[in-house]
Image (spheres, helix red, strand yellow):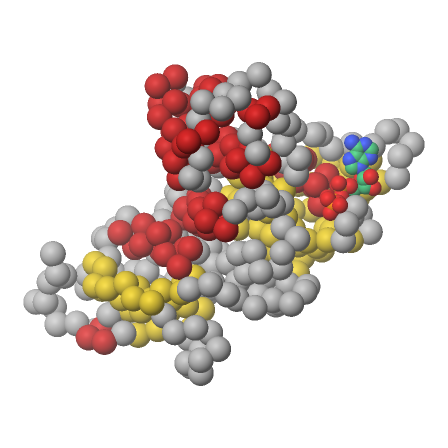
Amino acid sequence: MRLDGVGRRYGVRGPWVLREVQLDVPVSALLRIEGANGSGKSTLLRLLAGIDRPSAGRITGRRRSAYVPERFPVALPFTAVGYLTHLGRIHGLRGPESARRATEWLERFGAAGHARTPMAELSKGTSQKVAVAQALLAEPGLLVLDEAWTGLDRSAREVLDRAVAERVADGGTVVFVDHDPRRLAGAADARYRVEDGRLLAQDAHAPTAGPVTVTGPRVTIEAEGAPGSVLPAGPDRASAGAPQLPGGTEISPGPDGTTLLTVPAVHSDAVLRALLTARPPWHIRAVTAAPGPDDGTAPRTAIEGITALGADGPTRAPDEVPLP
Ligand SMILES: Nc1ncnc2c1ncn2[C@@H]1O[C@H](COP(=O)(O)OP(=O)(O)OP(=O)(O)O)[C@@H](O)[C@H]1O
């Protein structure tokens, strides 16, 4: 998907909120949008999600999109599960499949007890869970999240972090805005800042504005490839639909020719999935808690720019076979 010279203003004489925006939205990537209050972040997200049209320029190569708005309309004449099932059908799912996914996402977010509650009676936190679930259940090619974590409890925020990583690992693109600079810190493949109506590319791995510390548990995955195996690509090299490792995955050589991949725990499912669905699949030897970033462990190589261990390969005797 591509934005070419895109501009947006509200009203024919209104000031330009966005001007001359050029943006390539890659597949299998996580993009963070930053900017001051009122700078135009939500305006950009609505254009990306296709629920608003540019006043100038063109958007081409659209993928099936889902959007979590900053403010979710709660006064809807549905129960939570009824609303999600309805939305699933609009996204093209058959009725029973839509109902199954609606229930599954409510369970994942710890809101199954409110499945039959009318939307208008849901608490703010639970209606936010429904807002997020409606976007996730159709497994969109492009997921657009405008402060979607706001109002969620801690465990629901972690579920959403994981769901974002899974979407990206499955070949989707996620574009998000969040006021908390620690949100998915280190995981974004690209960062942009909206300033004076322009969209400015930022260094994806420079600290986000604000007091950034990567917090939360991390895990180390010890993986073993078949001879000549290639690690799933980082986001910059992935092709559509191919499994890939989330940005920020750190790799280092492990014992006996294995490879150690260290990631925030919320991304571990996505990494495991990418390894297990690679061709040929990697064998997972162990998943262990990793030391924290501040306890003096040596920095490891980041996955970006590394296509694979393929050329050097995990050093292993040719007659050795992966463990069952
Ligand atoms: N529907 C609208 N009609 C008129 N003006 C609008 C509309 N939506 C946004 N604006 C204006 O466009 C500008 C950018 O708003 P937008 O909500 O995109 O910014 P933002 O960066 O998302 O802000 P925040 O961080 O406060 O959510 C603001 O001046 C806002 O008042």
Quarter in which the N terminus is drawn:
top right
Q: As rendered, which of 241 and 42 lies closer to the eye?
A: 42
Q: Quadrant of residue 148?
A: top right
Quarter in which the C terminus is drawn:
bottom left
118 relative position to 201: left or right: left
| Count of labels in the image | 0
The residue furthest right is 13
Question: Who's the residue at 56% across and 39% down the image?
Answer: 125
Q: Is residue 39 above or below residue 78?
A: below
How far across and how far down the image is residue 34, in percent?
A: 68, 53
Question: Who's the residue at 63% across and 22% down the image?
Answer: 75
Q: Quadrant of residue 188?
A: bottom right
Q: Is residue 128 visible?
A: no
196 relative position to 51: left or right: right
Q: Is residue 144 above or below residue 292?
A: above
How far across and how far down the image is residue 91, in percent?
A: 48, 24
Q: Is residue 250 above or below residue 20?
A: below
Question: Who's the residue at 28% across and 63% down the image?
Answer: 287
How far across and how far down the image is residue 304, in percent?
A: 46, 64
Q: As rendered, which of 69 and 124 lies closer to the eye?
A: 124
Q: As rendered, which of 291 and 152 lies closer to the eye?
A: 152
Question: Who's the residue at 56% across and 68% down the image?
Answer: 213
How far across and how far down the image is residue 296, in percent?
A: 44, 83
Q: Is residue 196 visible?
A: yes
Quadrant holding ligand 1? top right
